[in-house]
Image (tube, rainbow, N blue to C red):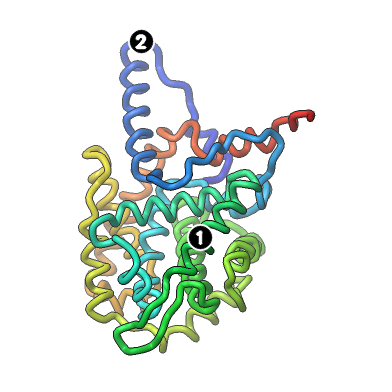
């Protein structure tokens, strides 16, 4: 979410009973969002230490792109669907995670990593990256086709990264700022490539043109087999963290499908009603996104901006 959009939705609540009702609604929505995006992983303090810009700083394009909850959730769902088309990447998830029983847990862990490496202090961001690298070392095995896999494989890390950042940017362009300059889009890919490289990825695309070429080159390696269909089934039936989030969750899942490239929608069998889906989903997302922004008056990006702008403590 752009800073301008953030200020627009930070309007003061009305006084009296209406104000109390608005406050309670805002807190309930914020609690539901927090429950969805935080789990058993590390709890990060985005408000300290004062003056710490993190790995990127508030002028980075990734601080803009990753700030909007609704678009990031839709982009995250799209990324998971896209990632599931790679047999080796999927094999690691299938053999070493509990996604079938705890899909929300996987979403929470991804959300924590993206938020922490984008907005966290430098020390917290580096610790998150090191933690994930250590986890990856234990994720090895053999795919159903007999090929060995390891989560630390630089090529697989690049695939997972590209699926994520291309989906996040697509969501930002559709639901937050369609006019984001192409130079800033390229800058976004260059910035986020740093995280992929720190995780061990190689030959990471760093521009719109390189991302497009990479996705085109990868298509012959992708397939939508039985395991992929199971991931789709689990994701499409993911429970809501709170009853209040059920309508928004259902809408975001459909928005995630809508963000997929047409070739990926065809592979996953989502192309039949693509036009109808878009007619329903896009206005729906533009309706709920401002409500969710209104609820997040003290979101991660805002706390991180205050931290970065604060005077460092003197030792």
Label 2, secondary structure: give it.
helix
- Cα distance in 3D space between marks 2 and 1: 48 Å
Q: Position of residue 43 (x, y in %)?
A: 48, 41
Which tag, 2 or 1, sits closer to the chain's start? 2
Q: Position of residue 218 (x, y in %)?
A: 46, 83
Crowd class of label 1 (few under 14; some 14 to 19; many from 20; radius 10 Å) = few
Q: Is residue 291 left or right of residue 66?
A: left
- The residue at the point 37 percent across, 37 percent down is 291
Q: Residue at x 36, y 80 (%)?
A: 87
Placement of 65 over or under 278, stated as above or below: above
Q: Residue at x 34, y 44 (%)?
A: 36
Neighbour class for label 2 at 10 Å: few (<14), some, many (≥20)? few
Q: Quadrant of residue 305?
A: top right
Q: Under tag 1, what secondary structure?
A: helix
Q: Quadrant of the C terminus?
A: top right
Foreground pick, 82 / 91: 91
Number of dots carrying numbers: 2
**Viewer-side residue, 80 vs 291:** 80
Quarter of image, res 34: top left
The picture quadrant where one finds residue 107 is bottom left
Residue found farthest to the right: 315
User: Depth-wise, is mark 2 or mark 1 nearer the camera?
Assistant: 1
Residue at x-position 51% and y-position 49%: 115
Q: Residue furthest top?
A: 16
Which residue is farthest front? Answer: 138
Report the side of 246 relative to 117 (left or right): left
Question: In the image, is 79 to the left or to the right of 225?
Answer: right
Coordinates of residue 110 in the picture (x, y in percent): 43, 56
| Res 132 label | 1
Residue 16 has which mark?
A: 2
In percent of width and height, residue 81 lies at 34, 68
- As drawn, the label of residue 8 is none
């Amino acid at each position: 979410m752009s800073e301008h959009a953030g200020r627009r939705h930070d309007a003061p609540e009305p006084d009296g009973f209406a104000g109390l009702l608005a406050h309670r609604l805002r807190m309930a929505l914020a609690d539901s969002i927090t429950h969805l995006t935080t789990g058993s992983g590390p709890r990060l303090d985005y408000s300290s230490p004062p003056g710490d810009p993190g790995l990127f700083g508030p002028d980075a394009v990734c601080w803009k792109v990753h700030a909007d909850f609704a678009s990031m959730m839709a982009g995250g769902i799209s990324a998971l669907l896209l990632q599931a088309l790679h047999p080796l990447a999927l094999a690691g998830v299938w053999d070493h995670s509990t996604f079938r029983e705890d899909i929300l847990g996987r979403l929470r862990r991804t959300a924590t990593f993206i938020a922490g490496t984008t907005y966290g202090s430098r020390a917290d961001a580096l610790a998150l990256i090191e933690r994930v690298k250590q986890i990856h070392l234990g994720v090895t095995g053999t795919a159903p086709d007999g090929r060995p896999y390891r989560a630390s494989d630089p090529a697989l890390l690049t695939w997972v990264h590209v699926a994520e950042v291309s989906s996040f940017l697509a969501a930002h362009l559709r639901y937050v700022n369609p006019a984001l300059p192409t130079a800033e889009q390229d800058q976004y890919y260059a910035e986020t490539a740093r995280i992929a490289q720190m995780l061990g990825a190689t030959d990471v695309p760093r521009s719109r043109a390189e991302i497009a070429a990479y996705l085109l080159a990868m298509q012959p390696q992708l397939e939508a087999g039985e395991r992929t269909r199971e991931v789709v089934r689990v994701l499409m039936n993911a429970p809501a963290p709170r009853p209040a989030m059920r309508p928004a969750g259902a809408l975001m899942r459909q928005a995630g499908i809508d963000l997929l490239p047409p070739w990926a929608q065809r592979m996953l069998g989502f192309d039949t009603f693509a036009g109808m889906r878009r007619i329903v989903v896009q206005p729906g997302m533009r309706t709920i996104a401002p409500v969710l922004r209104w609820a997040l008056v003290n979101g991660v990006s805002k706390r991180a901006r205050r931290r970065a702008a604060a005077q460092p403590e003197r030792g």
